[in-house]
Each structure stands twice: as structure tokens, then as C-alpha cells.
Image (tube, grey):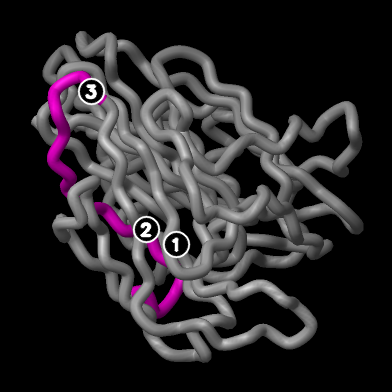
Amino acid sequence: MSGWRQGGVWLCLAGMLVWTSCSRPPAGAPTRMGREKQELHDPLRAVCGIYDDGWIGPSASLQLTAPAGAAVLHFKAMVPGLGDNAFRTVAEFRWNDLAVARHSLALGDTDLTIPVPEGAGPQRVAIRFDRTQRLPGGDARQVGGRLESIAFEPASEAKVQPVGEIADETTVHLGAGWNKLESYAGETFRWAAGEASVTVELAAAHDGMLSMLLEPGPGAGGHPLLLRVLDESGHAVGAILLDRRETHRIAVPLKGGKPETFHLRAEGGGVAAPGDPRVLNFRAFAIDARPLP
């Protein structure tokens, strides 16, 4: 096995443990990184889960220095076309273990500008793909994409993209029960109280996977919150015990090309938040769906 392949395997294995094993950034970490070999092996960047040729495994992390004041994370990569023209993957971006964005990526070039919380100095950035592809030609590596560059940049109106909806509107539409779209500390989300609905439409699929990045709010009173997932007839198709920010995936039955609405119904909660007249039982940061095989 060649040197880069052998090193890449260890990087990929390390990437699988990125959420717990990679250390805090050392002082002096650069503000950006491309896919040059010397950058990927720079100890100040502490790269995990990215191969020597720039391919990114299922999860990866690195260490960069953020500027003072408002900043964005600028990520450029390519998702390869390897036979499945309908392939999509959801990339979750984390900043010091805080999930700051989830984006659904189609085949081809990706250029994302992601607002992050303020925090000058060395920071840990992590990326995780929920779906990967196997490289061809006898190459057994599972990859989410190929890195072009990733960098912290000072925020400006010219650089920061307009805030997008939390739902991947190619597959999911939000219904009643959601509060207005909000942005705070570099994050975008919608709050919900007792019940909120989502409508899933996935071409001719008869079964789908609904993926939601959710977090309990002050309405839960510091206790776990149970969310029932109900279909249009009121029948339960799943349940979520919501006790922290986490991505939850629920298999949902569909009607083969027809939109299907599901309701997230909170059981319990309702505790008033200080200084806010709304009931904030839970909030969603990202929602998408895809067909089940």
C-alpha cells in the first residue's frame, strides 16, 4: 500500500472518532487550509479524516484560527458523480462541538458561506456526511467529497449568503405550528410549541427517512421532551425523546409520489420562558428527507 493510501486509512479511522478524540487547537493555527499535502500534514492544523489527496472521509476535523468579531466559515468542495445521478448527502458542520449548519449537497461543486459564533483565536471545525460513496477503480475508500479549501473569514454583507430556510425545500415543506425563521449567534432555526407539521414529497418513493436536527427549549423546563410523530390520520409512526441537540431520523410511510404531512406533537412542556410570551418547547435547525431503499 502506498504511503498516502496508508496514511489516508489512518486519517479516515481517526475521522470516525473526530467528535471525541481530536484535541483543542494549538496556538498559531492558520486561518485557512487547501488540499496541498503540506497543509494536510501541518501539525498546527491537526487534520483528522482527510486523505493526502484531499478526499474527505465520513467525518473529519481540523483546527483553524478565527478572526476577531463576526466571522464566517467558507467551505469549497466537490461531490463526485460515481454512477448515481440522484445522489445527495447532508453535511453537518460543527464549531467547537456546536452544530452550526447542515446543508444538503448534490453532485458537483459546493461553495458554502456559513456564519459561526464569535470567538477569536484557534477553533476546532468538524464536518460529518450522512451518506458517502465508494471511490471506483479498486479504491475502497468511502468519501463524502473532495476538499478544495476551508477558511475562516471576517463576515461582511458581500460574503455572507442570505439566510436560507431550515428545511431542504426540494423534499420537505414546513406547515403550521412553526414560529418565524430566526438567526442568532451564527445559527438559524425555528421554534415550535405544542405541535408543528412537515410535508414530505419524494417522487415515487413509498417509504422515506425524515432527518431533523432538533433541540429542546426552555418550554421543556430542563426535562426531556417526548415528541410523537403522527401521520395525517393521527396514527403514530415514531417517537423522539428530546433531551439535547441531536439529529433524529424517523422512517415514515409515503404514498408513492403524493405529498404526505406529518405532525410533531410535544407531550409535556409548556413552561414559560422569562421575558418571552411564546411557548418554546423545541426548535429545529435543519430538516430534510430522502427515499428509503
Question: Residue 169: where, in percent of width, then height?
Answer: 47, 28
Please identify, in this view, whether the residue under mark 3 or under mark 2 is nearer the observer.
3
Compare residues 283 and 2 and report the one nearer the observer. Answer: 283
* Sequence order check, earlier mark of 3 and 2: 2
* Sequence order check, earlier mark of 1 and 2: 1
Disc number placed over residue 214 in the picture, else none? 1
Q: Tell whether label 1 touches label 3 (CB within 8 Å).
A: no
Local packing at callout 1 (Cα closer than 10 Å; few below 14, some 14-19, many 20+) is many
SS under mark 1: strand
Question: Residue 239: where, in percent of width, then height?
Answer: 22, 66
Identify residue for label 2: 247
Q: On screen, 2 above or below 15?
A: above
Residue 189 showing in the rendered view: yes
User: CA–CA distance between discs 1 and 2?
Assistant: 6 Å
Which quadrant of the view contains residue 29?
bottom right
- Magenta span has 14? no
At 60% from the left and 75% from the top, the residue drawn is 279
Q: Amino acid at mark 3?
A: Lys
Q: On screen, 51 above or below 195?
A: above
Local packing at callout 2 (Cα closer than 10 Å; few below 14, some 14-19, many 20+) is some
Q: Tell whether label 2 touches label 1 (CB within 8 Å).
A: yes
Question: Residue 33: where, in percent of width, then height?
Answer: 65, 37
Q: Magenta span covers which residues?
A: 242-258
At 74% from the left and 77% from the top, the residue drawn is 276
Which quadrant of the view contains residue 114?
top right
Identify residue for label 3: 258
Which quadrant of the view contains residue 133?
top left
State the quadrant of the N terminus. top left
Compare residues 259 and 22 and report the one nearer the observer. Answer: 259
